[in-house]
Amino acid sequence: MKNSSYLLFLFVVLLSFPQMSETLITPALPDISRSLEVASQLLEFSVSIFFAGFALGVSFWGIGADWWGRLNAMRCGLLIFIIGSAACALAQSLQQLYIATFIQAFGASCGSVVTQTMLRDLYTDKAERSKVFATIGMSLAFSPALGPLLGNQLCLWFGWRADYAFLALLGIALLFWCWCSLKETRPANLQVRSASSLLALAKVMVRDPFILACTVLVGVCNAIVFCFFAEGPYIFISHLQLSPEQYGWVGIVVSLSIFFAGMLNRRYISKVGAERLISDGALLMAAGSVLYLLASSIVSSHHGTGLVYAVILIAPLFVVFLGMGMMVSNLLSVALKDYQSVAGSAGSLFGFGYYVVLSSLMAGMSLMHGYSIIPLPCYFIILSVTAYGIANWMQKKAAIMRLASDG
């Protein structure tokens, strides 16, 4: 199973569909707002609800992967995702959409935490695991962009409910694929943890500064991506007056930057180490955020519209997402290096933590949402500068530990 390219491709799909589940909906947000007759700020809050449900699901399915096995957790999660997506498609009010979105996200989270747990089961060597995560990161590069492109076309042709209907059908296809192709990877000697031992593990992880740093950094990186996709329709369609079809291609900048980040990670991981790449990525993300604020100020002061001004905004975003891509795969690779014997439970607690961070940061962005393009780059600067401070501390700590081990 470990050497199967076919199954590695399945892992890529399972990791990418939760991302696509959220970004696929973003082009339809203005239409949903009009259809349900709610303010755009209230509708954008559904993104925070998605990640709140995702955070709870990550905790639940990660622990379930240890208790019931990886396969059972994956299958149950996909089934709930199907039910939630269908409920979103049938929602007649904002409240119904909120509830259905929470259920959908709770189920979708199995694709993240259970798949990562299975990969850690299969790849126990740190260097090999880092390269696998870098390769997967390159493969996942185009999933954020695929969501808006596909979601926009479905919305134009059939209406916003078709986006959710498509996700329900995708869930059915994935459930069938997993049922036919996946095998259990849970180690035979894995001890199933009781509630008291899980609480003890949580206490250990909460006191581990390295895990806390990784938790915040992964949450910040994901928040930058999803804040962009949540605000994107309002910036590029409402302000710059791009057509929905043109906006659908904006996400390509995210994909290309993450793809190049994966190439850099694969090339330099063995030379400089994961902590150095995380720190360099945070610095790039901060520099790109400053450039993005300058570009936004230029566009705003000129009241610019059209493709030329869109390119002015997109150029610095490439730098932002390049840095983010360098960080995420390395963070996911090294975060649980000291918790391999409890990968499922530790992964669920780790994932719960960074999705709580993500959900909180998304709620913060929804409160800043307005009729200006300036709040988003300002938010990016705050997040990226904070990330650089934490990443720089991690790099210095890793250097001290290496010196101590050499001595």
Image (cartoon, rainbow, N blue to C red):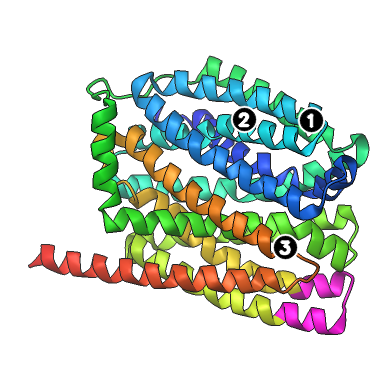
Q: Residue at x 28, y 36 (%)?
A: 199
Residues in magenta, as a range: 295-312
Tell me, yes or no, if residue 122 can be seen here.
yes
Between 43 and 71, the one lying in front of the other is: 43
Image quarter hosting the N terminus = top left
Q: Residue at x 82, y 84 (%)?
A: 301
Q: Is residue 199 left or right of residue 145?
A: left
- Residue 29 percent location from the top left of the image: 80, 48
Which quadrant of the figure has residue 392? bottom left
Instruction: Tell me if label 2 and label 1 are in contact, CB under 8 Å.
Output: no
Task: Say whether residue 100 is magenta.
Answer: no
User: Is 305 in the magenta?
Assistant: yes
What whole-number distance in Å separates the C-alpha atoms at marks 3 and 1?
Answer: 24 Å
Residue position marked by numbered label 1 in the rendering? 91
**Depth check: 276 or 268 in front?**
276
Question: What is the quadrant of the C terminus in the image?
Answer: bottom left
Marked residue nearer the N-terminal end (2 or 1) = 1
Q: Amino acid at mark 3?
A: His
Q: What label sits on residue 103 in the rendered view?
A: 2
Residue 292 location (% of width, % of height): 66, 75
Decide: is 332 above or below 349.
below
- Does the rendering let one see residue 330? no
Disc 2 packing (10 Å; few <14; some 14–19; many ≥20)? many
The number of numbered badges drawn on the structure is 3
**Coordinates of residue 129 in the picture (x, y in percent):** 36, 45
Locate residue 128, reporting x and y percent: 34, 45
Q: Secondary structure at mark 3?
A: loop
**For residue 352, above or below residue 303:** above
Q: Which residue is mark 3?
A: 369
Type of the residue with mark 1? Ala
